[in-house]
Amino acid sequence: MGNNAWNDKNKFIWLLSVLLLVAFLVTSGISYKVAHDSLSQQIESNTLPLTSDNIYSEIQQDLLRPIFISSLMAQDTFVRDWTLSHEQEPEKLIRYLKEIQEKYDTVTSFFVSEKSRNYYHSTGILKQIQDVEPDDAWYFRVRSLPESEHYEVNIDADTADRSKTTVFVNYKVFDFEGKFIGVTGVGLAVEKVKSLIELYQKRYNRRVFFTDRQGNVTLHGDEYDGADSLQTSLGLENLATRILTSPSAAFSYQRNGKTVYLNSRLVPEFKWYLIVEQEDAPQERELLNTFWGNLGLSLMVTLGILFISNMTLGRYQRKLEVMASTDKLTGAANRQVFDGYFRQALDKAKLTQSPISILLLDIDHFKKVNDSYGHGIGDLVLKTMTNMLRSALQQQDILCRWGGEEFLILLPGMDLTQAAELAEQIRELIFQREIKVNGLHISITASIGVAEHQAQEPAEDLIKRADLALYQAKEAGRNQVVLNHS
């Protein structure tokens, strides 16, 4: 950031300090006694602590049990051995699923084989999973989860009994070499979960419900009278995003003229948020006006706020600098900051008498990828390309997204021959890589132009020569590396 930004920050800090100190001197004397009395009254009339941690502990015992069971099933040697033995004698697996269901008192237990797509249930083979069947979309969704995610929790109709709604834990199963071979899991009756929520609400005198990461209310008790999502809940419209982007949070808001306190906590195993709400006592507004007025305007808190503000503004300044210099999609440097990187590398090269080269890379027929699979897949290809390029580069090398499907790589310390060898390695790496997503197998290639910086040559001319070499690579049939010697 420049001097203007630094001066603006200092002005803001000084202005904030003056306002806080003046407010403290004006209000502390007349508000302290009222705040103290109100605080004492509040403590006496409302001694219940925040209950979200207590409820979360009980959820770990009650609701997370199906996840533990599904994990055991997914790692069970019998399930994997039976699947790898070509699913012979299905009655053995069916008996195993029935025992799981009876032993752990679940409403269902199942296994779907990737090879045969048979849906094995504790009552028998129910069906064969079809990729064109909407009711079977859950299987392909679980199958396509990232490698770091082994399961999902969803609410759906039970395949064995369509009249029942069940909380399913769908767990991926891998063979002993890490290859995906199916999905297993158990189900918990929604009614049982609702009864737990009702129990929590009566025990703690709070309103308790769950939302998914999009803010949609997924589970609640029968007496719940709120909206279907946080975004449409009265008073929560402006807080929904903050709740859904924090692993835990505490807020207060106004609803029907009353102050409502909300505690949220992410339950990572479910990927849901636990929401606990309480309407506070009528004197809470007076308590807040006086208590926070005194504490917030005390000298120590003033100094603390100034310290935090200074650190926060500095952090945001650095964050803005990063945002201004990187491509949002890929995280590579953007075109606007290349000149700065080039000047730094050139100055260093002059001191060390070392060469500088650049690679200009273009993904071949990238438009066909977007047209055939959609821009979402196209974005995934660009991210994958960025990761591949980073893996092939050294720490001092600079990767820029030059525009669209073009990438420019600045190679300090490399002459034309070394840069050409690296370009060929990159081309072969891309050629050998097959991108797998949602059942699709996408192969891509790249054309690369290589040029070495010449004495007194402007950056624009160096890029033009690399661009000419890239054009020649495309004209020669693509998936090629071409050097510009001139």
Image (tube, helix red, strand yellow):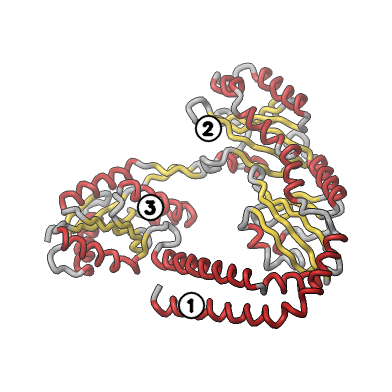
Q: Is residue 370 visible to us here?
A: yes
Q: Which quadrant would the N terminus be assigned to in this image?
A: bottom left
* Residue at image coords 73%, 42%: 57
Check disc 2 and report the residue beneath it. Answer: 180
Q: Are marks 1 and 2 in contact (CB under 8 Å)?
A: no
Q: Is residue 481 above or below residue 439?
A: below
* Residue at image coords 74%, 32%: 108
Question: Along the horizontal axis of the image, is 460 left or right of 204?
Answer: left
Check disc 1 and report the residue beneath it. Answer: 10
Q: Which quadrant would the C terminus be assigned to in this image?
A: bottom left
Residue 237 versus residue 208: which sits nearer the camera? 208
Residue 77 versus residue 297: which sits nearer the camera? 297
- Could you tell me residue 381's position as x and y percent? 42, 51
Between disc 1 and disc 2, the foreground one is 1
Q: Are marks 3 and 1 in contact (CB under 8 Å)?
A: no
Q: Is residue 455 above or below residue 126?
A: below
Q: Residue 285 is drawn in which quadrant?
A: bottom right
Q: Is residue 401 above or below residue 443?
A: below
Q: Which mark is residue 386?
A: 3
Local crowd size for mark 1, using a 10 Å CA cut-off: few (<14), some (14–19), many (≥20): few
Local crowd size for mark 2, using a 10 Å CA cut-off: few (<14), some (14–19), many (≥20): some
Q: Is residue 163 visible to us here?
A: no
Query: Disc 1 residue type?
Result: Asn
Query: Disc 3 residue type?
Result: Thr
What is the distance, in whole Å, between disc 1 and disc 2 at their CAs?
Answer: 57 Å
Q: Earlier in the sequence, mark 1 or mark 2?
A: 1
What is the distance, in whole Å, between disc 3 and disc 1 at their CAs?
Answer: 39 Å
Between disc 3 and disc 1, the foreground one is 1
- Could you tell me residue 62's position as x and y percent? 76, 38
Q: Is residue 126 above or below residue 269?
A: above
Q: Earlier in the sequence, mark 3 or mark 1?
A: 1
Question: Along the horizontal axis of the image, is 386 left or right of 127?
Answer: left
